[in-house]
Amino acid sequence: MGQADFQVKTPGGWLLRIQPEASTCEVLRGGRVEPGQGGAALHAIPEVVFVGQFESPSTQVQLFPNRKGKISISYRMKGHTSENHLIIPSYSEADQFPARLRLDPDTRVLVSQVAPPGRFAVLDESIPRIEIVTLKVKNPSLNVLVIHPEEATRPVETDHQKVRAADLVREGQGGDLVKNPVFLARIHLRNLDLARVKTLLVDFPMTSEEMEFIRTFLQIMIKNERGQKDLQAARDQLGHLDELYRIGSIFSQGRREAFDREMDTVSPSLARDLMPLVARHRVGIPNKEDQIYFWECEFRLRKIAEKTA
């Protein structure tokens, strides 16, 4: 059975009408309703998901101290006797605010779910870096914080920009990840080295899933919510790469009829970039029928590439 709706009068005189199942809260003071983020009638109740070596919290929606629009959430790490604090935004001026906490054994559930607004993931440093990168790829809107032992004694605020592929390489922590095309794509895109992103298709035998991961990076950059000028200037190139990886994913899945349809409408520039991918797949193929198909694809793409773009 789910948690029933309830209301609370805070020490500061605020009235909170909390709906746990809907993950919303109405905030009032003196009969006046405080609008939520973006002017919404209700506030969203934040959810904090701990992953790793943390003490299991209560999963009931509960109240926490709130000051200047920020909630202070207490938690404990296993093997530590001291209580630690996480600071997350509430967008409310009330002196207390509700939040929901939970503990997950690993990142699999978070990866498989689209993050709703107001979800925060708190991971300990035992979580493999590639899992953290994958989590950000699959859930770019998720707020991620990695807790290190030295940070567990002071309040920390969420900063999802801390997990950066380029930082791992600079710190010498890349290891085998430098052989991972998804990881490398993240580095090259961060540096706007788009030519190297293109060559990854030929340099690595990527799966369609890996190509879709890279497309997620590309689409975030194309969307460019912060209006960065360098991304605006590269928008057409990023769109070209996204289309290249989309068609490449179809090809790598062996969906020949779908790939044939793509070749009917593909632009000369895309045809030129697809040719090396087809050629790499043809090399070493023992089946004569497959070889003939790849030869035909190369021939078609070459004819298209020779046309005026």
Image (spheres, grey):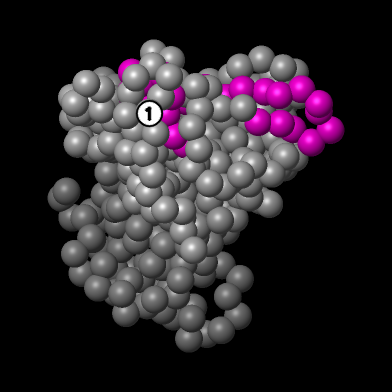
Q: Quadrant of residue 166?
A: top right
- 296, 259: nearer the viewer: 259
- Left or right: residue 233 compared with residue 172: left
Residue 25 visible in the current orientation: no
> Which is more toward the observer, 271 or 125?
125
Residue at 50% x, 57% y: name it.
112
| Residue 220, position as x, y percentages in the image | 35, 39
- Residue 13 vs residue 161, the one in the foreground: 13
Tag 1 residue: 9
Residue at screen point 19% across, 64% down: 265
Left or right: 225 as drawn, with respect to 138: left
Q: Residue at x 28, y 45 (%)?
A: 240
Task: Single out the residue that lies furthest toward the left.
Answer: 308
Is residue 58 visible in the rendered structure shown here? yes
Segment colored magenta: 75-99
**Residue 213, placed above or below residue 31:** below
Q: Which amino acid type corresponds to the residue marked 1 in the rendered image?
A: Lys
Q: Secondary structure at mark 1?
A: strand
Residue 181 at x, y percent in the picture? 56, 46
